[in-house]
Amino acid sequence: PLLLLDVYTSQITAPTVDRVRSTVTVIGLYGETIEVPCNNGAAKPEDLIFTKWKYKMDDGTSGDLLVKQAHKEKAQIQAMDGYKDRVTIAANSSLMIQGGSLVDQRTFTCMVVYGSNLDEHPVDVLVHKKPLPPQIKDKAKELENGKLTSLGVCTAADANPAAVIMWSKNGKLLVADGKTIIITPSVKMDPSTGLSTTTSGLQYTAVKSDVGAKFTCTAKHSLETQVSAPETFIIHCEWTTLPPGGL
C-alpha cells in the first residue's frame, strides 16, 4: 500500500492540483508535547485519501515522518531518526511531537491528498522555554558612599529565546549612564541544549540615601516576567572628625 501511495503522489504534481499554502508559525513549549496543526485545524476533506507529515532536515532535504490513510485507524510511522518514537497524529490530523526541544525548531509540512488534489501546509515551529528564576550572585559585602562598586551579577539561566535582564532600586528601573551606573549584559548558549543563560553585572555608585534600599533584577521573557528576591547592602560612609574646638 505504501508503494501505491508513493506512485499516486508522484503523479499529481501538476500546478493545478499541487498547492502549497502560506507558512504559519506555532510556538511549542520546551519539554512538553508540541501540537502542529494541519491546515490550521480545518475540517478534513470528505474525499480524503491520506494525510502525510514530513519535515525539513538539517541538510535542507525533506524527511518523512508518518502517513495516515483515511480508511485506516493507525498511522504508519516512516521516520527513521530521533522522531521515530516521538511523533503521532491526532484525530484532527495535527502532528504531535513528544518532549519538545530546540531540535524541533524547523518546518513541518502536512500533505493532504484528496480527490485529484494535493495540498501542502507548511508550519514553522518555534520552541520557547522560560528561564529559571533570576538570582543575584557575587554580591558585594558593602557599598562605599560615592564609589563605583560591583554590586552583583544577576543570572537568568536556561531560556529560549534568551531573557532580558533589567535592574531596579526600590522598584524603579536603573538606567546605565556609564559613570555612576554601569550595566554589563552577556548571553551564553549551552551547545548541548541550545538554551541560553543571560547574565547582567551591575556596578553602582551608592549615596547615603541608599541605606536600606532594595535592589532587584527582573528577567523579561515572552512566556513570563520574573523578579529576583530583593537585596539590601551596607553603605560604608567615611565621616570626618573635626578637631576639638572646630575649624
Image (spheres, rainbow, N blue to C red):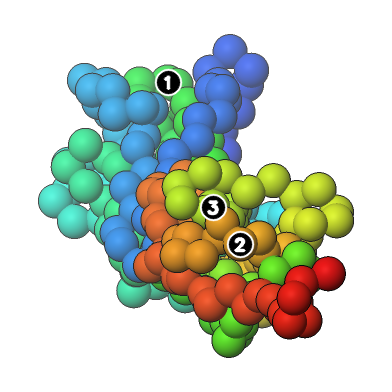
What's the residue type where badge 1 is placed? Ser
Verify CB contact (< 8 Å) between mark 2 and mark 3. Answer: no
Q: x and y percent of residue 122 in the render?
A: 52, 35
The label on residue 116 is: 1
The quadrant where residue 110 appears: top left
Residue at mark 2 to residue at mark 3: CA–CA distance: 17 Å
Residue at left 32%, top 47%?
A: 35
Q: x and y percent of residue 203 in the render?
A: 73, 67
**10 Å neighbourhood of mark 3: few (<14), some, or many (≥20)?**
some
- Say what secondary structure mark 1 lies in: loop
- Say what secondary structure mark 2 lies in: helix
Q: Name the one closer to the observer, 132 or 242.
A: 242
User: Does 4 appear above or below 114?
Assistant: below
* First along the sequence among labels 2 and 3: 3
* First along the sequence among labels 3 and 1: 1
Of tags 3 and 1, the one toward the viewer is: 3
The residue beneath circle 3 is: 168
The residue beneath circle 2 is: 208
Q: x and y percent of residue 149 in the render?
A: 74, 74
What's the residue type where badge 2 is placed? Lys
Residue at left 50%, top 35%?
A: 25
The label on residue 180 is: none
Residue at left 42%, top 20%?
A: 116
Of tags 2 and 3, the one toward the viewer is: 2
Residue at mark 2 to residue at mark 1: CA–CA distance: 80 Å
